[in-house]
């Protein structure tokens, strides 16, 4: 048979970790190894610090890396033509970023104190830590988010929620006043999103739907024949609404989890750059 | 209308008969405020009625007043139902029974046709209507909409959109689901039903209509429904039957055929002239020019040069003596064999869409693996085909008068060989759409092209020094078969020895393992299948079925075997392939226990992708859901590298086994979107990109024709301040497609009233580095692939 199709199975796609056969991991690893060897091979007098030859070298490399890492923010938003791929940038970003733990720490020569130099170091570690958490999120959450979404778009979820609310309104029409009030409460008080914290909760205690559902379940235990079907309708719709609310909230939660860390990562990056400027400036000024 | 205006100007006695109560119904029915374009722009307008780009309203108003001032004798609400008689003495019968006598008839009725009418008892009651002009004009009524196509669904949704109107709407659909309607419409319909805004009855047909009531038959009997109004949207019949009823012949029974016309637009019934969309010219400017011309012809002016003369002079400007347009047209018609049967009008029409090209000896015309779907014809000179990619000195000559490039035309696949000019050549390059039109209007052309294509694909696929003489007897018995998506070509286990060549479409090969079909292989156009049985014992070892609509060349197994016995090299080549395939089969058999579940998954993934149109894709965007962080940077990148509109919708689309197929163009082998584009604005670039050029008139046909819903009709948003400004000062909306609010605010200040045009992915054609969406994905989730890269044998897995 003329099989023009050849190897490369369906799932052999590379992600940013394995980009180009872990090229950047290898580079970063080599860099660290070199740094460690240089650090212990040299004989610093009086103590290891940023002022020795090796210290300068490590400092300069670290600084360059940090500046380059920060440029990811620009690269990501600037669509120019050319052979670059953001996957490659992210790959290098992660590995080189992690290598800073070793490079910069060696650069300090373990000389910490209450000064601008250590502040820069702490800020850098903060950025790196948040980046590490982001890395974890990037690697573990997408699949969960996809499963939760199940091919629905956010818009479709909201439309469905809206449709259920309308159905609720209709199903409530023949009910008693006090029950109608509960239904209205479930429509009014089933908030999604909102404040930062509430974006992380999938089952907020204030959810009107959950409360309403519980209330109707209690009502169901003690009903006249004429109301049984009517209430059952409402309960069925509320169950569906609860499920879709859970899905929407999970979706929002995953999105938030994939984004929050950036709100540490980015501002601290700016702070770090300022601190670095001060650090470099003070080193040369007081020399 | 243009004809009548010119007749009025010449003081010819005339009457303009119009079915509706207004002029130009097709244009009248455009959506309100639609921008009308006046393409092709080089073509001069020759009409007593003006026409220029503008809105629907302005155009209609301008025409109305032009017709009024010209003193056109017009009779509205006069549908012509029959034309009898002959030149000099025609009798036209109108819908109300009136008869009108005429010497000549000009037929310019367009291609809209008439809506199908209800044929049930009571189907002529006055509360049944076939069009809904204004859904807002109906209040508090029981309305039945019949027909689950897009028109019916859109009408029904319009009627129940506003609950305050108080309409109770029921949609009746004969089929159990809605195969003819767009996905978005079906979704909207079902959600309207779920929200209780309307009722939908499927598997329901109408039985009879009485005032105030309709009786329908459902699965379990009949039901009588109240109704104050019936809106029947049950398709429309093209005007062909009516036209044929007037004695006018069409060039072929093909659905796309047009009436046979002389160079003066005269039909086979003398005295009846056919112009406009019905004659095959869908652009308004052509229609209007023809109206003018025909009146001139009837008036005895045989000297008139068609208005497109200037276009030809431009087209022929590289040729010696470009002004002799009809001389050149004749040369082409006589020198190129497939053009011989064309009339003067046909060659003219079709040359308008084609290109004339000159090549120096040795110059490359196209290269192996280029994507190209146009057909070349040789008017002068000859060309050489490099049959062996490894040895450019091996060539085969194609002589003057013949054609080449036909395989690309038919299969939509890449060019199979490099072709150079052997001497100075004059070639006519016919784009795919024009070639298809030609094949369907002139059956002789189709037969000829098919014959050449079959022979050449045989020689090309099997290679091995075969000559046309070798394959002659095999060719004699070759049959072309059409398969629908899912049709089975070969059944596992059956005995037969025929060989099949896929000439268009693609196939999937499956094998039953443990009672389940397992996906083995994907076969694109240009491959062959069936040789195992021929070389083995005649038993089919796997099932082969069509992934999409396909065409197959069937070759007689016995004759083919005789051919093999005559040609050792070919036999050896086939046997190599055969061993390769046998090994794969054996491998799968041997391992079935151990990787059943993996193979299972692979098969279902393959099936899913084929369902999603990958079977006809050349390049599709896929997103690995295990990696996508939902940052939408892909969409932003697309928007930023393309006039601010994203051509992909990441979230939309379906997923399976963590592979997500977003709403984005698949660059189909045979793009459905191309099939009905009046200015022929959708083109295929040399590397396979299907793109829309600037001549798009915004008619929305491509959007309706794309089965994957990837084309949007959009205005180009205004320019944004640059990135630096946004980063530093927060001016502008930032990267990505700006939101509607910003565009609105900005557009009103810029006074940019750009018309809506069709927008789709162009695969980042011309952008260095390739697809921006893929480059901009930080995690590597987004990839663009071709089906061959993706749909692979299970063997590749381990
Ligand atoms: C949505 C859309 C957008 C388009 N946009 C553009 C554009 O921007 N620019 C462009 O150049 N082209 C455009 N086109 C194409 C163009 O509108 C048509 O091809 C053109 O109108 C055809 O003109 P015609 O005179 O042949 O037929 P029509 O315009 O269809 O006119 C035929 C007339 O004959 C009447 N009629 C039919 N049957 C009978 C009968 N039996 N008795 C009496 N009267 C009858 C009809 O009511 C109608 O008024 C567009 C088409 C569509 C659908
Ligand atoms: C000092 C070190 C670092 C600096 C200055 C830095 C800076 C940045 C900046 C400016 C961005 C762009 C954010 C945006 O615009 O969306 C970013 C993104 C990111 N960083 Fe870092 N970073 C550092 C270290 C790290 C480390 C160590 C990791 C991982 C272990 C990491 C992981 C990421 C990831 C995953 C992204 C998101 C990529 C994307 O979505 O485009 N970073 N970083
Ligand atoms: S627009 Fe639609 S029909 Fe056209 S090539 Fe793309 S996917 Fe195919
Ligand atoms: S390939 Fe280019 S045009 Fe097509 S979706 Fe991607 S970014 Fe948009
Ligand atoms: S750029 Fe990549 S990760 Fe971001 S949304 Fe698109 S596919 Fe997903």
Image (spheres, grey):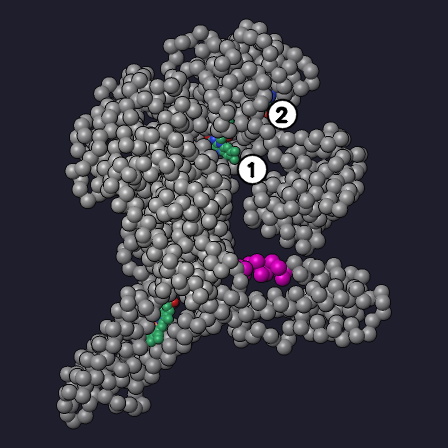
In the image, is residue B683 above or below residue A93?
Answer: above
Above or below for B164 versus B130:
below
Question: In front here: A242 or B798?
Answer: B798
Q: Is residue B650 visible?
A: no
> Marks 1 and 2, Cα distance to the nearest angstrom?
17 Å
Q: Position of residue B131 (x, y in %)?
A: 65, 34
Chain under callout 2: B
B147 left or right, relative to A111: right
List the residue tagged with mark 1.
Answer: B31
Q: Is residue A155 left or right of residue B296?
A: right
| Crowd tier of the residue under label 1, counting other residues whose Cα lies within 10 Å: few below 14, some 14–19, many 20 or above | few
Mark 1 residue's CB less than 8 Å from ligand 1: yes
Output the chain of dot 1.
Answer: B
Quarter holding residue A93: bottom left
Report x, y in % for residue B591: 40, 64
Q: Nearer the viewer, residue B432 or B232?
A: B432
Q: Quadrant of the C terminus of chain A?
A: bottom left
Residue on which the image places disc 2 = B20
Disc 1 on helix, strand or loop? loop
Most frequent secondary structure within the magenta stretch: helix
Label 1 or label 2, whichever comes before in sequence order: 2
Tell me the residue at 47%/55% (across/down).
B512
Ligand 1 within 8 Å of the CB at mark 2: yes
Q: SS class of the residue under badge 2?
A: loop
Query: Residue at the spot x=70%, y=51% of the render?
Result: B197
Residue A211, percent from left and from top: 69, 74
Q: What stretch of residues is rendered in magenta?
A: A152-162
């Amino acid at each position: 048979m003329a099989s023009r199709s050849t190897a490369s199975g369906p799932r052999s796609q590379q992600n940013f970790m394995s980009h180009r056969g872990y090229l950047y991991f290898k580079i970063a690893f080599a860099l660290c190894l070199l740094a460690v060897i240089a650090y212990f091979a040299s004989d610093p007098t009086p103590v290891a610090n940023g002022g020795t030859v090796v210290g300068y070298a490590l400092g300069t490399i670290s600084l360059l890396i940090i500046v380059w890492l920060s440029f990811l923010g620009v690269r990501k938003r600037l669509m120019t033509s050319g052979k670059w791929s953001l996957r490659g940038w992210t790959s290098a970003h992660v590995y080189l970023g992690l290598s800073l733990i070793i490079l910069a720490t060696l650069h300090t020569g373990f000389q910490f104190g209450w000064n601008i130099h250590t502040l820069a170091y702490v800020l850098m570690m903060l950025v790196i830590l948040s980046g590490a958490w982001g890395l974890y999120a990037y690697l573990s959450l997408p699949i969960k988010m996809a499963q939760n979404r199940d091919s629905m778009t956010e818009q479709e979820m909201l439309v469905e929620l809206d449709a259920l609310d309308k159905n609720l309104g209709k199903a409530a029409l023949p009910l008693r006043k006090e029950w109608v009030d509960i239904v209205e409460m479930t429509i009014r008080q089933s908030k999604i999103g909102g404040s930062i914290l509430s974006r992380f909760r999938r089952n907020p205690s204030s959810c009107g739907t959950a409360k309403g559902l519980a209330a109707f379940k209690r009502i169901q235990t003690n009903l006249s024949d004429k109301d049984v079907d009517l209430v059952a309708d409402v309960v069925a719709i509320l169950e569906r609404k609860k499920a879709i609310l859970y899905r929407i909230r999970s979706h929002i939660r995953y999105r938030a989890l994939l984004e929050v860390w950036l709100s540490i990562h980015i501002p601290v990056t700016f702070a770090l750059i300022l601190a670095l400027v001060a650090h470099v400036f003070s080193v040369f000024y007081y020399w | 209308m243009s004809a009548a205006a010119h007749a009025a100007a010449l003081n010819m006695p005339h009457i303009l008969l119009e079915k509706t109560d207004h002029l130009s119904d097709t244009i009248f029915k455009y959506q309100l405020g639609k921008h009308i374009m006046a393409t092709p722009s080089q073509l001069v307008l020759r009409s007593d009625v003006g026409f220029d780009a503008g809105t629907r309203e302005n155009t209609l108003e301008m025409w109305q007043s032009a017709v009024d001032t010209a003193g056109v004798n017009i009779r509205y609400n006069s549908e012509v139902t029959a034309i009898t008689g002959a030149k000099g003495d025609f009798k036209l019968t109108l819908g109300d029974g009136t008869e009108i006598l005429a010497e000549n008839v000009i037929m310019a009725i367009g291609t809209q046709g008439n809506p199908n009418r209800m044929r049930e008892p009571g189907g002529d009651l006055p509360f049944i209507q076939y069009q809904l002009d204004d859904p807002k004009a109906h209040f508090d009524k029981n309305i039945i909409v019949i027909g689950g196509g897009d028109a019916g669904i859109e009408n029904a949704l319009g009627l129940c959109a506003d609950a305050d109107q108080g309409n109770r709407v029921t949609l009746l659909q004969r089929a159990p689901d809605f195969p003819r309607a767009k996905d978005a419409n079906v979704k909207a319909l079902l959600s309207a039903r779920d929200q209780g805004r309307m009722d939908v009855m499927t598997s329901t047909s109408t039985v009879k209509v009485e005032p105030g009531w309709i009786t329908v038959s459902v699965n379990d009997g009949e039901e009588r429904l109240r109704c104050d109004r019936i809106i029947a949207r049950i398709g429309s019949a093209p005007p062909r039957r009516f036209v044929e009823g007037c004695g006018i012949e069409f060039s072929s029974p093909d659905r796309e055929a047009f009436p046979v016309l002389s160079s003066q637009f005269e039909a086979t019934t003398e005295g009846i002239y056919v112009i406009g969309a019905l004659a095959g010219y869908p652009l308004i400017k052509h229609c209007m020019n023809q109206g003018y011309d025909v009146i001139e012809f009837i008036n005895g002016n045989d000297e008139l040069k068609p208005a497109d003369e200037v276009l030809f002079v431009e087209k022929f400007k590289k040729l010696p003596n470009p002004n002799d347009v009809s001389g050149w047209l004749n040369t082409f018609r006589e020198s190129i064999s497939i053009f011989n049967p064309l009339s003067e009008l046909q060659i003219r029409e079709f040359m308008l869409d084609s290109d004339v090209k000159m090549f120096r000896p040795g110059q490359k015309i196209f290269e192996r693996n280029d994507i190209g779907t146009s057909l070349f014809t040789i008017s002068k000179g000859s060309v050489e085909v490099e049959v062996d990619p490894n040895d450019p000195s091996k060539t085969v000559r194609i002589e003057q008068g013949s054609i080449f490039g036909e395989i690309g035309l038919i299969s939509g696949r890449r060019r199979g060989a490099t072709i150079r000019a052997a001497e100075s050549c004059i070639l006519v390059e016919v784009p795919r759409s024009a070639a298809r039109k030609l094949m369907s209007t002139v059956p002789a052309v189709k037969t000829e092209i098919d014959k050449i294509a079959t022979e050449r694909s045989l020689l090309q696929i099997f290679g091995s020094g075969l000559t046309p003489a070798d394959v002659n007897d095999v060719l004699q018995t070759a049959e072309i078969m059409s398969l629908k998506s899912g049709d089975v070509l070969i059944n596992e286990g059956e005995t037969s020895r025929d060989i099949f060549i896929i000439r268009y479409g693609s196939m999937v090969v499956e094998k039953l393992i443990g009672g389940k079909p397992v996906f083995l292989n994907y076969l694109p156009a240009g491959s062959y299948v069936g040789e195992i049985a021929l070389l083995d014992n005649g038993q089919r070892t796997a099932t082969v079925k069509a992934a999409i609509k396909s065409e197959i060349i069937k070759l007689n197994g016995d004759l083919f075997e005789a051919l093999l016995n005559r040609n050792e090299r070919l036999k050896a080549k086939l046997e190599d392939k055969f061993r390769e395939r046998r090994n794969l089969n054996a491998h799968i058999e041997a391992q079935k226990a151990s990787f059943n579940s993996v193979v299972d998954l692979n098969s279902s993934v393959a099936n899913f992708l084929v369902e999603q149109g990958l079977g006809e894709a050349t390049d599709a965007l896929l997103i690995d859901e295990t990696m996508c962080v939902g940052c939408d940077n892909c969409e932003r990148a697309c928007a930023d590298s393309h006039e601010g509109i994203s051509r992909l919708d990441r979230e939309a689309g379906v997923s399976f086994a963590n592979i997500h197929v977003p709403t984005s163009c698949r660059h189909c082998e045979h793009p459905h979107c191309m099939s009905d584009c009046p200015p022929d604005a959708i083109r295929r670039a040399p590397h396979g990109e299907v793109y829309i050029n600037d001549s798009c008139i915004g008619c929305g046909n491509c959007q309706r024709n794309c089965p994957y819903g990837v084309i949007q009709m959009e205005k180009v948003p205004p320019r944004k301040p640059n990135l630096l400004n946004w980063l530093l000062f927060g001016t502008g909306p930032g990267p990505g497609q700006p939101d509607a609010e910003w565009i609105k605010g900005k557009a009103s200040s810029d006074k940019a009233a750009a018309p809506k045009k069709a927008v789709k992915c162009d695969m980042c054609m011309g952008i260095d580095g390739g697809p921006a969406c893929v480059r901009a994905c930080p995690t590597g989730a987004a990839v663009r692939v071709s089906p061959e890269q993706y749909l692979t044998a299970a063997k590749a897995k381990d």
